[in-house]
Image (tube, rainbow, N blue to C red):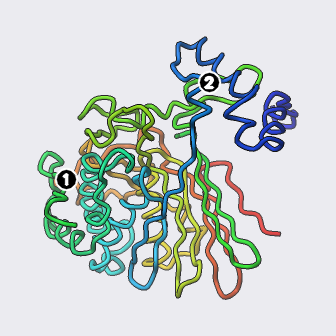
């Protein structure tokens, strides 16, 4: 109830072990023993040796440009940064401002671009330690223009006719995001996740935290969707030691070489398109950051072959125009798309944008 005090002594002891012993406070010793015991109770396969051998890997960010802005985001095994930049490259040559925000033409182009990006995601993206991800292709403006040229300005392309590009031809809901900028101008964008709400539903007994269900981010079977409706192929198949493909898209946008926008969100497969729309809202439609994160959003991801919408995101005329083009429009299954936390750096100082969709807060001190 509001006003109650939640005490988590098991979690406090876990955090103290990590503070005292670093990674060994989690991957070895009492915490690891508790994880393995909970795994055995639930029929899991992770052993003490698996935990002891685990190492975090530094991955370089991916970088692209949109007009005069430089976009820096997360690289594989997250698909977020590469797809975000790929979509921005496709949209860069379009007169988005004259189309008008959330007009039928704007939503049409946005949807068609997203379809092609997610088709590439399904076919080509996975853990780069196990799969040759064609990053040079996905980040190429020439490739983006070729993909854009396959879009009709007046007619929806059925997803059955949208195919991944050929690299041989070219070089949770239980997710949390925070954005931070300090007085020296350093900017941090961080996204973490359990995947879906409460992860796999198991709390590590005596340690005070949930186990994730990130296995759902693998392609368990080619062409079969996961909980977010995403399909995958061999690039994201399950293998020992492999990291699953993610949609997390923590992003810093630079203007004149300095941080201008720090942004990210939870939302599963909608994360990438949510960050895309917030950047466009700020850069193209000149919204302040609070408006940019709060206005209604839409989402498409190749399969299923629909435009998913929030309540009141489209006018009746816009919806009718899109349907006349061949688009199928459905309410987003969870109602709200994303919960963005963003900061924009201006000459006057910092603007915080906390999404009205959840218990998000902007704080300055």
- Of residues 316 and 310, the one nearer the viewer is 310
Q: Secondary structure at mark 2?
A: helix
Tell me the crowding category of disc 1: few under 14, some 14 to 19, or many 20 or more residues within 10 angstroms, Cα based: some
Label 1, on which residue? 164
Q: Position of residue 62 (x, y in %)?
A: 43, 66
Quarter holding the C terminus is: bottom right
Q: Relative to 152, is 193 on the left or the right?
A: right
The residue at the point 45 percent across, 31 percent down is 215
Quarter holding the N terminus is: top right
Answer above or below: position of 83 versus 41: below
Residue 222: name its quadrant: top left
Label 2, on which residue? 48
Q: Which mark is residue 155?
A: none
Tell me the crowding category of disc 2: few under 14, some 14 to 19, or many 20 or more residues within 10 angstroms, Cα based: some
Answer above or below: position of 155 versus 91: above
Q: Position of residue 39 (x, y in %)?
A: 59, 18
The residue at the point 67 percent across, 53 percent down is 360
Residue 46: name its quadrant: top right
Q: Secondary structure at mark 1?
A: loop
């Amino acid at each position: 109830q509001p006003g109650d005090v939640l005490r988590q002594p098991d979690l406090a002891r876990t955090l103290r072990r990590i503070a005292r012993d670093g990674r060994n406070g989690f991957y070895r010793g009492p915490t690891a023993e508790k994880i393995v015991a909970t795994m055995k109770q639930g029929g899991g396969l992770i052993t003490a040796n698996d935990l002891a051998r685990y190492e975090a890997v530094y991955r370089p960010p991916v970088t692209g440009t949109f007009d005069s802005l430089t976009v820096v985001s997360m690289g594989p095994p997250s698909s977020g940064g590469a797809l975000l930049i790929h979509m921005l490259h496709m949209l860069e040559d379009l007169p988005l401002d004259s189309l008008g925000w959330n007009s039928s033409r704007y939503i049409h182009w946005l949807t068609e671009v997203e379809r092609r990006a997610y088709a590439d995601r399904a076919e080509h993206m996975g853990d780069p330690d196990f799969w040759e991800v064609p990053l040079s292709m996905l980040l190429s403006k020439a490739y983006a223009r070729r993909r854009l040229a396959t879009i009709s300005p007046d007619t929806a392309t059925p997803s059955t006719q949208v195919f991944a590009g050929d690299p041989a031809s070219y070089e949770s809901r239980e997710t949390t995001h925070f954005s931070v900028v300090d007085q020296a101008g350093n900017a941090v964008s961080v996204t973490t996740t359990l995947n879906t709400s409460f992860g796999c539903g198991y709390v590590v007994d005596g340690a005070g935290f949930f186990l994730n269900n990130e296995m759902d981010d693998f392609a368990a079977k080619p062409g079969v969707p996961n909980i977010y409706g995403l399909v995958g192929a061999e690039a994201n198949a399950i293998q020992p030691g492999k990291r699953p493909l993610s949609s997390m898209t923590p992003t810093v946008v630079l203007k004149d070489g300095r941080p201008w926008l720090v942004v990210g969100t939870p939302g599963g497969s909608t994360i990438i398109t949510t960050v895309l729309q917030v950047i466009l809202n700020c850069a193209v439609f000149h919204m302040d950051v609070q408006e940019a994160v709060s206005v209604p959003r839409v989402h498409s991801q190749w399969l299923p072959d629909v435009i998913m919408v929030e309540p009141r995101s489209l006018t009746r005329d816009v919806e009718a125009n899109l349907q006349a083009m061949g688009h199928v429009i459905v309410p987003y299954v969870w109602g709200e798309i994303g919960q963005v936390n963003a900061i924009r750096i201006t000459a006057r100082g910092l603007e915080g944008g906390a999404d009205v969709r959840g218990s998000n807060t902007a704080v300055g001190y």
